Image (spheres, coloured by chain):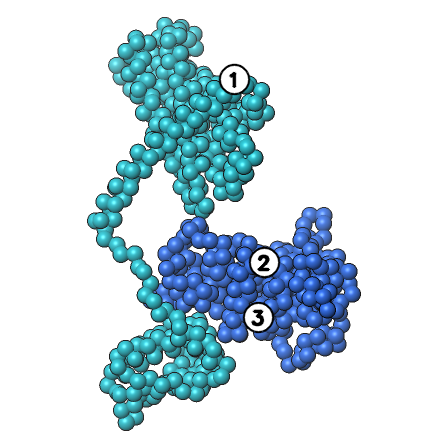
Chain colours: A cyan, B blue
């Protein structure tokens, strides 16, 4: 206590409260406790008087606490009189008299019901997401056909710009990461295969794994994280600033102007990056086999030639454009779903990456079944 | 404007306390200078408005006073202290004594309206949850919102409600000064008039000092005690509405007595 805010004294069945000092936000915590004490002390008396004459400063916090004291006393059946209120605070105290009259509608929570409700919402959301993705796929098919019929309407400059961003500028990071991945797979293979004396099969493993699966999937995941998220954030912030509505009112189709060039850029960039990435992974694997496994590059290359076929290479690269379409479509759907708040932008960007990676892995599984059944 | 005319304009300048004082302020971006030698004084308890053409630097002046923008030269004193010269603690204590209403409201979009209003209380005061809830609702009611908006997010509110909620947040700690950046922009005339009345009422009940930047002639006329006109990178005149209407400066004439001004029409009709 730095100074007295409220003095209590009981005389002849009356509780006298003498307020003093600054009844302001800074002291509101102390004041609230004093007021609760006063309410407890008032239980034994018939009437309460509150003298406000010595109050030096009063703000909304103080005025509200005074009002709360009077209201609580009244609810307990005590009569409370506020005396000597300085003229300059009369307006504020009267204002406080009208505040907090209606109870605030609180959201009632029941953990089990909430969990069930969340589960239900999630199921509905998943169904809705799938529907939206299919809608976007259909819409993009129409836009693509329309653009094919009138090729001069295609936004080549925009496409080249995005190709530069998602393709060319992604090359260094993709090279580095796939190179390291190739190194690691080869090292692990050598380490374990050596025990059986079959080091040479590491080349088969690396070749098939990288060309058929890892090369394209890892690159696609990196592109989803690097470029899919950027697409969602761009489209989302354009949505927030009504830029997309502006395009629409000028008679442009946002899908044609914004989404198609981005999607085409991805469809071109991803197979190219997957190819570059696979080569870097094989190079890394060869390097590890030579330096760590003591396998000369000649042996590595000739074994690689025997182990893999053009089919393996084709299987990997055929998947790439489909993955690109998945990334592009999911990123656009999520971008256009962004609502007004910064939080929703963050949420949609995250879910864009998560959903596209999930769908790509699912798609990869379907492709594995498909290629196995056609004997590739 | 020299001291004598200012005194004449306000009448009782002698007994008033100056809460914001700006002297020879120079500020700008890159090569350009936006404000060059701005001086003004705001006294306790008045509603002070700053007007000027778009892009003249009114918002820059407001942002410089609250310390969001750096300045090249000049002195600013709020409650007699220069915000930039203070240490972190003293600066926080000073900032607690003012509230700012930004043009777009600047409510935190990830928090509900109630949490937005409680945010400054949580950071600066140690209060019980009950008291914070009650005061947050009280503040929202004081700015004319009802308790049902408490649990809504800013994205669910209309423009006028956002302004009101943002004003409630600016008032959360019962500041002595509120800075309002274009408080009535984006509101319809009825909403704007209600907002003017609200500012006036709050200024009277809470004893606020209001520093506002505005374009709204109606607000200037309805609530402002004194008006500063910015032109040519400096304050060309300060005074009450009557002084503005009597001025011969061409820009002031066209602004206050132009076709958009009701007062101008009334004056022309007489």
Of badges 2 and 3, the one in the foreground is 2
Rate crowding at label 2 as few (under 14), some (14 to 19) or many (20 or more) other CA atoms within 10 Å.
Answer: many
Spatial separation of the CA atoms under disc 1 and disc 3: 66 Å
Of A353 and A141, the residue lying toward us: A141
| Left or right of A31, for residue B160 | right
**Subunit ID for the residue under disc 3:** B
CA distance separating discs 2 and 1? 51 Å
- Camera-side residue: B206 or A15? B206
Instruction: Please identify, in this view, whether the residue under mark 1 or under mark 3 is nearer the observer.
Output: 1
Q: Give the number of the disc on residue B209.
A: 3
Answer with the quarter of the image where residue A127 lies: top left
Q: Which residue is mark 2?
A: B182
Label 1 element class = helix
* Mark 2 vs 3, N-terminal side: 2
Total number of numbered discs in the rendering: 3
- Image quadrant occupied by the C terminus of chain B: bottom right
State the image coordinates of residue A200 (x, y, percent, origin top left). 33, 11
Q: Identify the residue position indicated by label 1 in the image.
A: A149
Q: Residue at x 64, y 81 (%)?
A: B15
Q: Residue at x 61, y 63 (%)?
A: B218
Disc 2 to disc 1: CB gap under 8 Å: no
Q: Position of residue A11 (x, y in %)?
A: 30, 93
Residue A283 locus on image (x, y percent): 44, 16
Q: Residue at x 46, y 65 (%)?
A: B143
Q: Is residue A183 above or below residue A96?
A: above
């Amino acid at each position: 206590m730095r100074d007295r805010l409220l003095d209590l004294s009981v005389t002849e069945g009356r509780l006298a409260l003498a307020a003093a000092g600054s009844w302001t936000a800074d002291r509101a915590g102390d004041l609230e406790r004093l007021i609760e004490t006063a309410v407890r002390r008032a239980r034994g008396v018939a009437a309460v008087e509150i003298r406000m004459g010595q109050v030096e400063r009063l703000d909304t916090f103080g005025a509200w606490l005074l009002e709360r004291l009077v209201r609580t006393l009244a609810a307990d059946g005590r009569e409370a009189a506020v005396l000597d209120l300085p003229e300059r605070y009369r307006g504020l105290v009267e204002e406080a008299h009208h505040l907090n009259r209606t109870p605030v509608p609180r959201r009632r929570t029941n953990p089990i019901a909430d969990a069930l409700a969340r589960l239900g919402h999630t199921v509905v959301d998943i169904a809705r997401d799938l529907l939206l993705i299919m809608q976007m796929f259909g819409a993009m098919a129409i836009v693509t056909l329309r653009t094919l019929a009138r090729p001069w309407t295609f936004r080549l400059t925009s496409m080249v710009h995005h190709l530069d961003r998602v393709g060319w500028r992604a090359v260094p990071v993709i090279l580095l990461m796939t190179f390291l991945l190739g190194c690691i797979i080869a090292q692990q293979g050598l380490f374990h295969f050596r025990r059986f004396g079959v080091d040479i099969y590491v080349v088969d493993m690396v070749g098939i794994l990288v060309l058929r699966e890892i090369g394209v999937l890892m690159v696609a995941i990196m592109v989803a994280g690097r470029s899919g998220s950027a697409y969602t954030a761009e489209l989302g912030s354009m949505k927030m600033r009504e830029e997309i509505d502006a395009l629409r009112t000028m008679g442009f189709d946002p899908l044609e102007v914004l989404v198609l060039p981005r999607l085409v850029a991805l469809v071109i960039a991803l197979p190219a990056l997957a190819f570059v990435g696979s080569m870097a992974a094989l190079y890394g694997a060869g390097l590890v086999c030579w330096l760590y496994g003591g396998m000369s590059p000649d042996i590595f290359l000739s074994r690689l030639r025997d182990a893999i076929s053009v089919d393996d290479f084709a299987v990997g690269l055929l998947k790439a454009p489909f993955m690109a379409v998945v990334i592009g479509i999911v990123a656009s759907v999520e971008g256009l779903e962004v609502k007004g708040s910064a939080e929703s932008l963050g949420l949609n960007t995250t879910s864009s990456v998560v959903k596209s990676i999930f769908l790509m892995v699912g798609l990869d599984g379907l492709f594995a079944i498909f290629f196995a059944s056609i004997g590739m | 404007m020299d001291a004598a005319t200012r005194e004449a304009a306000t009448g009782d300048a002698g007994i008033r306390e100056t809460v914001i004082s700006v002297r020879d302020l120079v500020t700008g971006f890159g090569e350009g200078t936006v404000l060059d030698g701005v001086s003004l004084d705001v006294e306790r308890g008045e509603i002070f408005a700053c007007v000027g053409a778009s892009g003249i630097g009114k918002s820059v002046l407001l942002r410089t006073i609250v310390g969001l923008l750096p300045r090249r030269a000049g002195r600013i004193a709020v409650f007699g202290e220069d915000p930039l010269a203070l240490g972190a603690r003293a600066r926080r204590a000073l900032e607690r004594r003012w509230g700012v209403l930004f043009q777009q409201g600047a409510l935190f979009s990830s928090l509900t309206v109630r949490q937005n209003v409680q945010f400054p209380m949580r950071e600066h005061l140690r209060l019980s949850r009950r008291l914070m809830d009650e005061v947050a609702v009280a503040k929202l009611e004081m700015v004319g919102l009802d308790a049902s908006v408490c649990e809504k997010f800013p994205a669910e509110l209309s423009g006028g409600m956002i302004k009101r909620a943002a004003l409630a947040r600016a008032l959360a700690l019962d500041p002595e000064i509120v800075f309002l950046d274009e408080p009535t922009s984006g509101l319809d005339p009825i909403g704007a008039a209600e907002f003017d009345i609200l500012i006036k009422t709050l200024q009277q009940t809470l004893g606020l000092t209001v520093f506002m930047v505005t374009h709204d002639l109606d607000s200037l006329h309805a609530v402002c005690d004194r008006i500063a006109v910015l032109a040519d990178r400096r304050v060309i005149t300060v005074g009450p509405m009557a002084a503005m209407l009597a001025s011969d400066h061409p820009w002031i004439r066209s602004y206050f007595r132009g076709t958009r001004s009701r007062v101008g029409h009334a004056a022309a009709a007489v």
